Image (spheres, grey):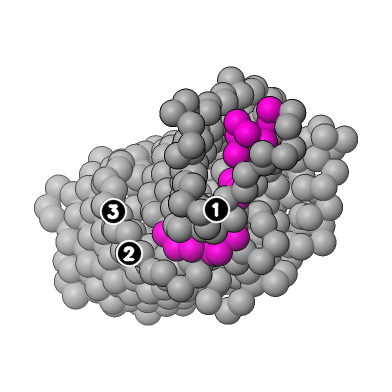
């Protein structure tokens, strides 16, 4: 997959800087994605809950599912993620591994028995917090492209005398460290109802609180072939934060006791975002004891982002009290991603239209009950939004889980998820320099405590 990145920082002094922190276009795509995060039961079944309901995270997919609850219920979920990133850059590999712990879900639903009404027999009010996307990651890239980024002597080549210019075109080594943090947190407020025992209807207001921080460090060591050395270090820091809002409407039809169909539409999320960006450059050369430094100061820019809308169709078959199978299909129109004001983002919005595609996501799951123990499993597949993506760029994974039901309407659910995909990062935008290749593996463990009232 070849992402098109552009320089945020521009020029420092007379030196053209092509080392990259994340671009506006890639940030928009990153912020439009949602991880498969939720309760442990939801995760164990790869999120295939659009037609099932009866789970707090199921309400995030299809708010009609809250009306499937029989009783008032609360839940809280803790998650541990292990991420392995293998980086490759011009023949050199580097293994990176980190663990991250978070509260990934907390919420509750209140059920009001309305059986006195011949039509609307049940009303549900729900509130759910979800860690939609966890941006915490870090990796290091090392190698030698043979093409120098910083090859001009910052002192001799800017003294007005072209006869003593010195160029360091021989690359000894290149290093890139990418450290990110932050989260996209979602609060979902839902109203749902059951109509005539055959239809469930739901509506949600969804608010997002987004914060993203990136620290990108590029270092390069060069020589001129005559024992003169240059060492350069460029630090770029990006802080993005803001709020967003969207809506979801959903329906679940139950034509028989065994079969359920679901459909849900999620509007775009309309974000108001702010970027704070700074670059800090340091260059040392062996023929001058002085350290060359340049700092841009903090640049601030406000803008808007409209994410793609999402349509989900679902099917579930209930095997009596013994178990169930479930399937979700989600269609997402990434070419409709927009950055505003449009006059400031002509290039980026053209990229969304021409370089992105509509994506499909498939979630398949099954659950089998053995008295008070439930066994679960699922499969997840998600297209990359890039037109030129290769097969391995698509996210693919599986999930397993187990649930225990105790006396007093208390349940404990445990889940394990594994996903893999590849990606690239063009931290040097130079002709002849290939991007760093990333091979990502995520292992997630979640535990949910459910208390029924």
* Location of residue 365 with respect to 113 vertically, above or below: below
> What SS does tag 1 mark?
loop
- Disc 2 versus disc 1: nearer the observer: 1
- Marks counted in the figure total 3
Marking on residue 224: 1
Residues marked 2 and 3 touching at CB (< 8 Å): no
- Between 96 and 272, which is closer to the camera in this rendering? 96
Residue 193 seen in the figure: no
Marking on residue 98: 3
Dot 3, crowdedness within 10 Å: few (<14), some or many (≥20)?
A: few
Question: Mainly helix, strand or loop, the magenta region?
Answer: loop
* Location of residue 362 with respect to 341 vertically, above or below: below
> What SS does tag 3 mark?
strand
Residue 202 among magenta residues: no
Based on the displayed image, in which of its 4 quarters is residue 446 positioned? bottom left
Residue range in magenta is 142-159
Marking on residue 200: none
Indicate which disc, 2 or 1, sits on the residue closer to the N terminus: 2
The alpha-carbon separation of the residues under discs 2 and 3 comes to 10 Å
Dot 1, crowdedness within 10 Å: few (<14), some or many (≥20)?
A: some
- Between 71 and 95, which is closer to the camera in this rendering? 95
Looking at the image, which residue is at 44% across and 57% down? 173
Horizontal side of 292 relative to 335 (left or right) equals left
Residues marked 1 and 3 touching at CB (< 8 Å): no
Looking at the image, which residue is at 53% across and 26% down? 293
């Amino acid at each position: 997959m070849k992402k098109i990145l552009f320089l945020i920082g521009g020029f420092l002094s007379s030196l053209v800087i092509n080392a990259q922190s994340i671009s506006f276009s890639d940030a928009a795509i990153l912020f439009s994605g949602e991880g498969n995060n939720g309760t442990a039961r939801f995760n164990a079944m790869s999120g295939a809950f659009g037609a099932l309901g009866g789970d707090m995270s199921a309400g995030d997919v299809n708010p009609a599912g809250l009306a499937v609850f029989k009783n008032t219920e609360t839940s809280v979920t803790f998650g541990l993620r292990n991420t392995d990133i293998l980086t490759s850059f011009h023949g050199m590999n580097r293994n990176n591994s980190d663990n991250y712990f978070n509260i990934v879900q907390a919420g509750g639903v209140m059920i009001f028995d309305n059986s006195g009404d011949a039509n609307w027999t049940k009303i549900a009010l729900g509130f759910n917090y979800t860690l939609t996307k966890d941006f915490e990651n870090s990796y290091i890239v090392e190698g030698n492209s043979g093409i120098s980024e910083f090859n001009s002597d910052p002192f001799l080549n800017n003294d007005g005398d072209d006869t003593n210019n010195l160029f360091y075109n021989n690359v000894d080594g290149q290093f890139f460290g990418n450290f990110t943090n932050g989260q996209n947190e979602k609060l979902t407020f839902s109203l749902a109802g059951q109509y005539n025992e055959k239809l469930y209807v739901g509506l949600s207001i969804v608010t997002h609180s987004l914060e993203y921080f990136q620290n990108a460090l590029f270092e390069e060591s060069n020589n001129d072939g005559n024992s003169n050395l240059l060492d350069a270090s460029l630090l770029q820091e990006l802080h993005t934060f803001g709020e967003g809002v969207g809506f979801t409407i959903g329906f679940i039809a139950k034509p028989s006791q065994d079969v359920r169909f679901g459909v849900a539409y999620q509007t775009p999320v309309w974000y108001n975002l702010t970027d704070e960006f700074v670059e800090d450059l340091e260059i040392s050369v062996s023929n001058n004891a002085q350290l060359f430094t340049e700092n841009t100061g903090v640049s601030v820019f406000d803008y808007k982002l409209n994410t793609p809308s999402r349509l989900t169709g679902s099917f579930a078959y209930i095997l009596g009290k013994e178990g169930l199978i479930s399937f979700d299909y989600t269609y997402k129109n990434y070419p409709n991603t927009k950055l505003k004001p449009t006059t400031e983002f002509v290039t980026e919005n053209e990229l969304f239209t021409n370089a992105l595609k509509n994506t499909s996501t498939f979630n398949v799951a099954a659950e089998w009950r053995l008295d008070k123990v439930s066994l679960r499993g699922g499969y997840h597949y998600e297209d990359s939004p890039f037109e030129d993506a290769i097969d391995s760029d698509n996210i693919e994974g599986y999930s397993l889980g187990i649930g225990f039901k105790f006396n007093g309407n208390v349940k404990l659910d445990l889940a394990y998820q594994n996903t893999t995909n590849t990606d690239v990062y063009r931290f040097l935008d130079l002709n002849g320099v290939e991007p760093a290749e990333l091979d990502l593996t995520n292992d997630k463990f979640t535990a949910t405590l459910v208390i029924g009232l």
